[in-house]
Image: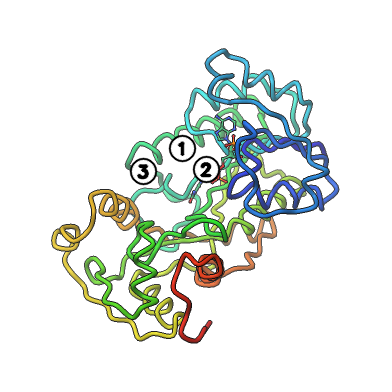
Amino acid sequence: MRVVVIGGSGHIGSYLSPMLVEGEHTVLCVSRGLRQPYQPDPAWSRIERVVIDRSFAETRGEFGTSIAALEADCVIDLTCYTLASARQIVDALRGRVHRFLHCGTIWVHGHSVQVPTTEDAPRDPFGDYGCRKLAIEQYLHEEFRTSAFPAAVLHPGHLVGPGWIPISPAANFNPEVFADLARGHELLLPNLGMETLHHVHASDVAAAFSLAVTAAGNIAGESFHVVSPAALTLRGYAERMAAWFGRKPVLRFLPWEEWRAHASENDARVTWDHIARSPNCSIAKARTLLGYQPRYSSLAAVQESIAWRVQQGLMPAPQHAQS
Ligand SMILES: NC(=O)c1ccc[n+]([C@@H]2O[C@H](COP(=O)([O-])OP(=O)(O)OC[C@H]3O[C@@H](n4cnc5c(N)ncnc54)[C@H](OP(=O)(O)O)[C@@H]3O)[C@@H](O)[C@H]2O)c1
């Protein structure tokens, strides 16, 4: 297939674009050409780089037509964040692609009711990002129902991979959380530490998209969670990471209002965004319909990412590595 990957050089695309080449597809990676993929891969020499600034092209009403002009069988849209963006690309691609895969997020769910959350759970997101992604998901499914537009939506969890900091046991991106665990220092966690995070390795997300490109059944009109096999509690995550660093965890739990007083405004906001949702999603549907088989548990993904940071000298080394 001729596959266009919009945003094909970022967290997901760094794995996905080469993976599609290995699958014998012709791959065109659309980006501004500003950043390099996270991992080098010889397959990049066989990937056509198409330089377009989506924001600029969209304001001129030219982005959709530019993508249509690439004459792909399948378009994977990793960087669509507004309904207007989705409308522009769908209008241009209607009747011109066999498959259209949109990258959503598990934040289309709000508070969990029954966990693990399945794709058919009623949507009740909160926050601008999740609400916008839900509007896109609903629009794409409506386009499938009304005009057979062949869109499917893949909803990743918190992306993890070597090259960037994973969401930490304090549910924010402050690298000091991992450093405290590595040094055996006390770590403050909100509440009882029983709220959850649901990570996924970016290569597993890439594999799910790759499977969706060629999925035999009709996956149009469907949504799929793409996360690790199991979510983590903050407490369990902190304990296991401390052990990985060869340390005994020194954890102290504070009610939210007290905990937030110890954190920066930004860290507290990010932590709240994550624990208020406490995602815990099912991958049974992706396993069944796509053949999705994640290679990484949440902990294995995070440990690989932190090992990379240690190797780069960005993090204290483990006392004795444990898995
Ligand atoms: N991050 C997470 O934990 C997370 C979790 C769930 C879902 N998601 C979803 O994952 C998707 C993002 O995937 P990602 O994290 O792999 O992306 P990313 O790392 O942010 O990469 C963005 C890609 O888009 C390109 N890009 C950025 N701005 C552009 C523009 N104006 N015009 C053209 N290309 C542009 C970038 O290359 P250039 O800079 O060179 O243009 C790069 O290839 C989103 O749909 C998001 O909702 C993310």
The answer to the question of whether label 2 and label 1 lie on touching residues, with beta carbons closer than 8 A, is yes
Name the residue that disc number 1 marks: 133
* Alpha-carbon span between mark 1 and mark 3: 9 Å
Q: Does ligand 1 reach within 8 Å of label 2's beta carbon?
A: yes
Give me the residue at 66% from left, 64% from top: 293
Q: Against 125, is 53 above or below? A: above
x%, y% of residue 40?
71, 53
Q: Residue at x 40, y 41 (%)?
A: 130
Q: Classify 10 Å Cα crowding around label 2: few (below 14), some (14-19), many (20 and above).
A: many
Q: Position of residue 208 (x, y in %)?
A: 66, 54
Using the image as rendered, state which of residue 47 and residue 317 is in the foreground. 317
Say whether disc 1 or disc 3 marks the residue closer to the N-terminus.
Answer: 3
Q: Position of residue 150 (x, y in %)?
A: 68, 34
Q: For the residue carrying disc 3, how many other residues have a C-alpha within 10 Å: few (<14), some (14-19), or many (20+)?
A: some
Location of the N terminus by quadrant is top right
Q: Quadrant of ligand 1?
A: top right
Of residues 92 and 302, the one nearer the viewer is 302
Q: Which mark is residue 125?
A: 3
